[in-house]
Image: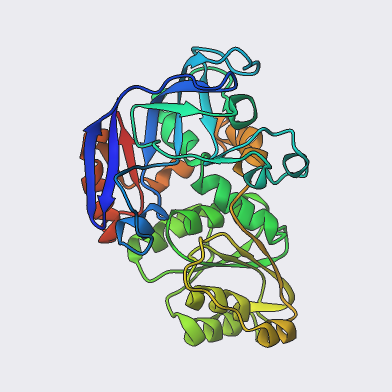
Amino acid sequence: MRGAVLYGAGDVRFEERPDPKIVEPTDAIIKISATCVCGSDLWSYRGVNPISEPTPFGHEYCGIVEEVGGAVKTVRPGQFVIGSFFASDNTCPHCLAGYQSSCQHRVLMGAAQWNMLRVPLADGTLVATPEVPSDDLVASLLTLSDVMGTGWFAADAANVKAGKTVAVVGDGAVGLLAVLSARQMGSERIIAMSRHPARQKLAREFGATDIVVERGDQGVARIKDLTKGIGADAVLECVGTEESMWQAIHASRPGGTMAYVGVPHGVSLDGQALFFSHVRLHGGPAPVRRYLPELIDLVWKRKIDPGKVFDLKLPLDQVAEGYRAMHERRAIKTLLRP
């Protein structure tokens, strides 16, 4: 098989390695139809998350089942499937409570920026589409593996619903799809925080009613101004820095909810300030598997088109350029096709 290997900061190579094999009877092997570069991959690409050895990369995937282990019952060769960035058994107490990304037997997926992928715990991880999709649906279906599922979790965790004012901190793919999720859940007032015209335009396409270009205290003040001094009922934090976390908390109204789905880096929260804010916090790695059936149905019926976040599409062997473009903010998100 062929795919992306990260050697160190700024050093992504396209290499050949042995094809994956069935290791456990609960495994499946899929032929990748599409994969992509995630914003969270950039932490390692930029050297913030150092790596000690060459590492196959990627955790977003969809494709055709090639082979299954003897214990796999729910998917079969020839089906088009989507899986989460965490493999899960979908039967443990945490999974049954809807938190498959905290499965007692979870496996963090890697090596998805390849043309073949071994998926452990296939029955609990993979969800098949009604049939093999037309090519124009593949990009949107791919987003369900992470960024759309993560944006949806942000809106769900913040209890977004009709009549509530929502603010979204972060204009990457997750933030933009959090806007789409909030709109789909019925919010009519959605404030997107973005400084980039192309991202602002897509945020409006997805349902944003207001754009705030200011950051930090100025951004909070602008949201308070837009909400008559009250703050947002729900704030979706989709970045993961200390500045963005505090911006989200301070933009929330007392009694509001701040959902955080950006992977935290260097974040330290002042307990006393949080105590007196009266803001609820809920977040973490999105339990994408919980939402896959519903989101597949929405994409399949063409009620949502989250694939619009892919503004750069490249063949898989140009994966290094895909990383560079996102690192330099020339692209929101890079789609890769083997």
Colouring chosen for the image of the structure = rainbow
> Toward which corner of the image does residue 111 lie, by quadrant?
top left
Residue 93 lies, in percent from the top left, at 78, 41
Q: The N terminus lies in which quarter of the figure?
A: top left
Seen at 42% across and 76% down, the residue is 213
Q: Nearer the viewer, residue 101 or 233?
A: 101
Seen at 48% across and 82% down, the residue is 216
Query: Is residue 55 found left or right of 128 in the rendered image?
Result: left
| Residue 31 against residue 92 in the figure, above or below | above
Residue 139 lies, in percent from the top left, at 42, 36
**Residue 43 visible to an observer of this rendering:** yes
> Toward which corner of the image does residue 168 lie, by quadrant?
bottom right
**Residue 305 visible to an observer of this rendering:** no
| Residue 29 against residue 292 in the figure, above or below | above
Marks counted in the figure total 0
Seen at 73% across and 83% down, the residue is 275
Residue 217 lies, in percent from the top left, at 51, 87
Query: Is residue 116 found left or right of 284 in the rendered image?
Result: left
Which residue in the rendered view is the most extreme toward the front?
Answer: 52
Query: Is residue 25 found left or right of 219 in the rendered image?
Result: right
Q: The C terminus lies in which quarter of the figure?
A: top left
Query: Is residue 119 found left or right of 213 in the rendered image?
Result: right
Residue 13 lies, in percent from the top left, at 22, 42
